Amino acid sequence: MKTIIEPFRIKSVEPIFFTTREERTEILRKADYNSFRIKASDILIDLLTDSGTSAMSSNQWAGIMLGDESYAGSNSFFKFEDSVRSITAMPFIIPTHQGRAAEKILFTILGGKGKNFISNTFFDTTRANIEFSGAEAIDCVCEEGKHPSIPAPFKGNMDISLLRKTIEEKGASSIPLIMLTITNNSGGGQPVSMQNIRDTRKVCDEYGIPLYIDACRFAENAWFIKLREDGYAGKPVPEIAREMFSYADGCTMSAKKDAFANIGGFLAMKNPELAVSCRNLLIITEGFTTYGGLAGRDLEAIAIGLQEVMDEHYLQYRIRSIEYLTQKLVEAGVPVMQPAGGHAVYLDAREFLPHIPVYQYPGQSLVCALYEAGGIRAVEIGSLMFGKYDTAGKLVPATLELVRLAIPRRVYTQSHIDYVAEVIIEVFNKRNELKGMIITEETPLLRHFTAKLKPVDV
Ligand SMILES: *Cc1c(COP(=O)(O)O)cnc(C)c1O
């Protein structure tokens, strides 16, 4: 088999920013060892997130010029609606400025005290919107999904028997909907199989509960189904995507992921009464029903991106580039989450740095080392992000200490990825020199965004 190449050529380029190691040491110190506090212009390769960081195509940029900025009934809205409907077949399609705005509307209406929502794994904004409404968010991911180093084809699957048990425990009438996050972002971008979507649907039918899809990475998930699930190898991706949505009563989506847009999202559903309530709330929070917090040009970019993302040459390149980096790291003995997910590579910082205790944030130490060694920005997904304190003020660590390298769509080439692997391996070979970190300043909520830290011996 020949090399899988980037399925595009480059028409417009953007500089990346070179610094010396000495400069980076100083930048890190001034940024208080928190990658969120580093200026983008001091970063060489930015793998902080794949959200809103995609490169748009020449077609999307042409769409931007065609954007119809009419307040009501914009032509761009109808293009957007047609595009979303061609994939989801949902009758009611509501644009929002981001995925979380769609969640806010949905869970404000369906949530509230005494309500329960179940997912394979809720993404953090989804969980936050549910909990903010007073309801409870419950994750029922399959057992394989809880073990980073055990390979399995569909580690994002719902645990069907745990789902049933949870419904019995909480009572079906307290559960306004069940949601499948596709792919499972918090679980490492791991896919959900079509069989699991069908099985989840069956349970929903038994109990009369609607099924929703968090569709942020629907195309990446469809590609994994094509590659890994019996009976799908010969099916076109748009057909697989349509089948996935055919089992759902509604969906939420962030267009900053699998729609190659820099902003946007939507909420879609089959239930007409719910659609009326959602649109009423949309009008007072986001905007009129045909723009929902977006400019007409954004709706154009999303309409086009949603179709482009299902191109199989693109998906093959996309998924291969994540797998390619994972493979290089595995070959060098670097502990990574396996198998590779759809949008990011996760380093297991606890195994990478066994000499640093969890209360000295090994993940954050690794994030800083990657920046210092090669100008790469990653993010800690461990006890800095999810750790809590007990009543005695002692750290209750997260279950996993991970470092995420999220790969923006169509942005970096194979040589960038080769460089990233080289830097990680260089840091791995000198891992014994890395020091733990302590927090010097933090906020009570979402502290990882703004916390200040320093190495233990400074
Ligand atoms: C990003 C994301 C969201 C939230 O979308 P925003 O556009 O960032 O508000 C929800 N669910 C998943 C799975 C995501 O990855």
Image: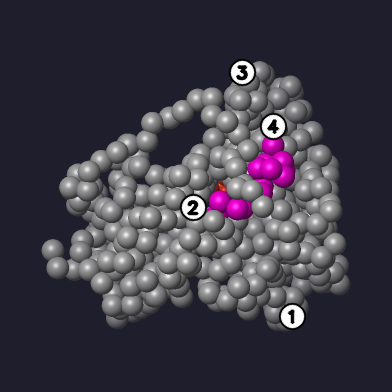
Which residue occupies 68% across, 68% down? 154
**Amino acid type, residue under disc 2 in the picture:** Ala
Query: Which type of secondary structure does the marked residue at label 1 adopt?
Result: helix
**Amino acid type, residue under disc 4 in the picture:** Ile
Which residue occupies 83% across, 44% down? 89
Q: Percent position (x, y) of residue 457?
A: 14, 68
Classify 10 Å Cα crowding around label 2: few (below 14), some (14-19), many (20 and above): many
Classify 10 Å Cα crowding around label 1: few (below 14), some (14-19), many (20 and above): few
Distance (Cα) linking label 1 and label 4: 39 Å
Number of marks in the rendered image:
4
Q: Which stretch appears magenta?
A: 308-322
**Amino acid type, residue under disc 3 in the picture:** Met
Please name the predominant secondary structure of the magenta segment in the image: helix
**Amino acid type, residue under disc 1 in the picture:** Ser
139 with respect to 86 (left or right): left
Decide if ligand 1 comes within 8 Å of the CB at mark 4: no
Q: Are marks 1 and 2 in contact (CB under 8 Å)?
A: no
Closest to the observer: 449 or 410? 410
The reply to whether residue 19 is visible in this rendering is yes
Distance (Cα) linking label 2 and label 4: 23 Å
Distance (Cα) linking label 4 and label 3: 13 Å
Q: Percent position (x, y) of residue 353?
A: 33, 73
Distance (Cα) linking label 2 and label 3: 30 Å
Q: Are marks 4 and 3 in contact (CB under 8 Å)?
A: no
Q: Which callout, 3 or 1, points at the residue further toward the start of the chain? A: 3
Q: Which residue is mark 1?
A: 161
Q: Which residue is mark 2?
A: 406
435 with respect to 169 (left or right): left
Query: Which type of secondary structure does the marked residue at label 4 adopt?
Result: helix
Residue 65: mark: 3
Q: Which callout, 1 or 4, points at the residue further toward the start of the chain? A: 1
